[in-house]
Image (cartoon, grey):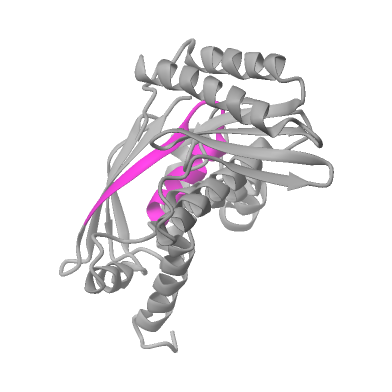
Amino acid sequence: MLVFGRKPEGVRDKLRKILDELEKKDPDILGSVTMRSDGLILASAIRSGIDEDLVAAMLGSILNIGSRVSQELKVGELQDIVMKASDGVVAVVPVMKDIVLGAIARSGANLGLLLLEMKRAGEKVREVIRSL
Amino acid sequence: MGMGGDGRLRNLLLYYLLRAIREMGVSLPLLLRRTAQMASNDIEYLSKEFFGGNINVGDFNAIAESILQIMKNEGLIEDFKINELGTSGIDLEIKGCEYLNLVSEARAKGEAECPFCLIALTGAIAAATIKDSVNFNEVITETDTNNKICKLKLSFVVV
């Protein structure tokens, strides 16, 4: 289980910067969050007015359930989950063991670009966490 | 109690419920964290209803101790002994947890420990209540069912 320790100065800022860069690279992205799979938010760029703890818990659930379905149906390791709704898209990508990246995008977003940029951002998140 | 005296049937049903949630893919740490967030959002109500409005919601140790005390008063645990208390962790012993036979049911089905620790939830509520300072990380439990004692180490993390 990832533990930041008592003085994680700068780590949250580094992760937040990665999320900000992600949104710049794909302007269809409206918000993003990186978190542990147990719902603990590491950094968030979710719009104000949204309960980010609840969003993190739900994204954690989506990832947990997706992993469980992949395992039960023996279709290999989960790579990503994309949920298309009438007014937007939600994508969740596992970054490393116990760490998740989630994003909310506009309806009609280019899904290939969205997932590509999320996976690139995920690599940067992984680097930050491994440097701890 | 009306359900087997020691609550075994109730706890067995709770065990099945938790196991079903877990088998469907929702991890119990995720469930615990969200439950703690919900309870902490209601901390003023809980304080008024159970502590006469006397919880200092800015003081982690006070919240944790107060919730343990009310659990004792409500008969959920017989007693508790705190060996270490602080925002980096809580090391404590619980005697006579009302849900102790959850451990027995879990062990009988090949699992290692209690599927959902009420005391860990207490710590998580305390942490969630003073959010931005500390977050619940994980709990390590060691249960002696013969002597009805749980030794718990809860760790917290600053993110």
Which range of residues does the magenta coloring cover? B118-142
Where residue B84 sits, quadrant-wise, is top left
Residue projecting furthest to the right: A87
Left or right: residue A104 versus residue B86 is right
Classify residue A31 as left or right of residue B135.
Answer: right
Between A108 and B96, the residue placed more toward the observer is: A108
Number of disc labels:
0
Q: Position of residue A124 (x, y in %)?
A: 48, 17
Expressed as whole percent of the image width and height from the top left, the position of residue A17 reads: 59, 12
Front-lying residue, B135 or B75: B135
> Does the segment drawn in magenta span residue B62?
no
The percent coordinates of residue A5 (x first, y second) are 36, 22
Residue B124 screen position, x and y as percent: 46, 44
Q: Is residue B152 above or below residue B59?
A: below
Q: Residue at the spot x=42%, y=61% of the render? A: A72
Please name whichever residue, B45 or A125, is drawn nearer the observer in this view of the structure: A125
Residue at x-position 54% and y-position 40%: A80
Q: Is residue B65 above or below residue A2?
A: below
User: Is B89 situated left or right of B147 in this image?
Assistant: right
Direction from residue B114 to residue A35 in the image, left or right: right
Screen quadrant of the N terminus of chain B = bottom left
> Does any portion of residue B27 appear in the rendered image?
no
Residue in the foreground of this view, choosing between B22 and B94:
B22
* Residue A67 in view, yes or no: yes
Check the image and report above or below for A21 versus B155.
above
Depicted B115 relative to depicted A97: above or below? below
